[in-house]
Amino acid sequence: MARVVGMSRESISTTGDPSDQLRPLDTLAVTGGRPARGPDAPLNSPIVPASSFGAGGTFEYARYDAPTTSALEEVLGAMDGGQATVFASGMAAATAAMDLIPHGSIVVAPTSAYTAVGVRLRELDADGRISLRVVDVDDTPAVRAAVDGAWLLWLESVTNPLLQVADLPACIAAAHDAGALVLVDSTFATPVLQQPLRLGADIVMHAVTKAISGHSDLLQGALITRDAELHERIRSRRIILGAAPSAFDCFLALRGVRTLPLRMRHAQASAQELAQRLAGHPAIRRVRYPGFGSMISIELTGGVPAADSLCRSVRVWMHATSLGGVESLLERRRRWPAESPTVPDDLVRMSVGIEDVEDLWSDLEQALQS
Ligand SMILES: *Cc1c(COP(=O)(O)O)cnc(C)c1O
């Protein structure tokens, strides 16, 4: 009987070759997480739908580890320069990271972090489990002042949906000087545009749900670190808290990763063009665009009614939450009651996909007119 390849951690190709870790991202995204090469070996890591594995091997039980999960973790780790643990959603990754925080510690976090992240940190603060200090992540002196005595600096850069950019090297250095760990939620940038571990961050977090998987068809999250001990602690949070991903979703995410660099570059080029055109449009009061990435936030001259009308009138863009998929999406963020009140109530967040940029523009023009 032919040996089934791609079934053990050892047989996944790029972990064995340290030089692969240094390859450009475009190559890593394609070569990472593949089964060992050989006659009749499948090119793709197969979906292995099993909760349990024969005793004595490396997987044992799927909450600990599983072949399809491991293949995805290998490519995500390689792209960010660390070891990845994948979870059942971005929030499962976030709450696993929060579970590492010792009782009573000071945590510094963004004024307007991702909605559910902000909600959970405030819950922990209200329960007396942490002491929360919030800062605008693009205000480096404020971050510097806030990290004194902190256990963790939780950064998000680029932030959702205000698109603030943190000076990562400066913030990371300040936190480390104060003895704090640094986690960076890098979902909006993806490893294509930013690799926080290479700038000294201790943990990078991604909502894999978004651009990394890229097709709006699954929920997943990842925590990546280069510290072996921290990696074990993170992994134990998946094992104990239980938010393990499904093999099928790992397969889909891995397929999405193959085109991540291409998708990000295309979406970014379109976003740059659209941000410029929007800035000159009379219906737009303010455009927030950090100069890179696929996300744009706009505020409208006509306020909330104009924002809602824009969302209702698009025909190529879709009115929906989430971001980073091949399809362009927009929504007025404050329609969510839990959204931070620091977000203007007419702010429309736009996730630029990979459609033709002129189609996207003419759709916006017609929708802004109505
Ligand atoms: C979506 C998102 C999350 C949460 O991910 P889910 O998969 O929805 O749980 C966390 N952070 C950021 C920046 C996000 O955009």
Image (tube, rainbow, N blue to C red):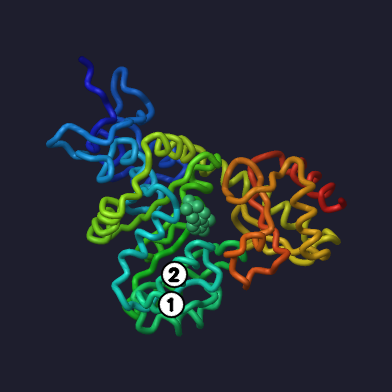
Dividing the picture into quadrants, the one containing residue 195 is: bottom left
Q: On the image, which quarter does residue 129 sit in?
A: bottom left
Confirm whether residue 190 shows in the render: no
In front: 200, or 363? 363
Q: Residue at x 35, y 83 (%)?
A: 149
Measured in 3D between alpha carbons, the distance from the residue under mark 1 to the one under mark 2, in whole angstroms, is: 7 Å
Above or below, 259 against 88 in this view is above
Residue 63 percent across, percent down from the top left: 28, 44
Going 76% across and 58% down the picture, which residue do you hit? 307
Direction front: furthest residue? 127
Q: Residues within 10 Å of mark 2 (few under 14, many from 20)?
A: many
Say which residue label 1 marks.
132
**Disc 1 + disc 2, Cβ < 8 Å:** yes
Comes first in the chain, label 1 or label 2: 2
| Three-letter code, disc 1 | Leu
Q: Tell me: residue 349, above or below residue 9.
A: below
- Which image quadrant: the N terminus? top left
Q: Position of residue 267 (x, y in %)?
A: 63, 46
SS class of the residue under badge 2? Answer: helix
Q: Is residue 3 left or right of residue 360?
A: left
Disc 1 residue crowd, few under 14, some 14–19, many 20+, Cα 10 Å: many
The residue depicted at 66 percent of the width and 60 percent of the height is 335
Give the labeled residue for mark 2.
121
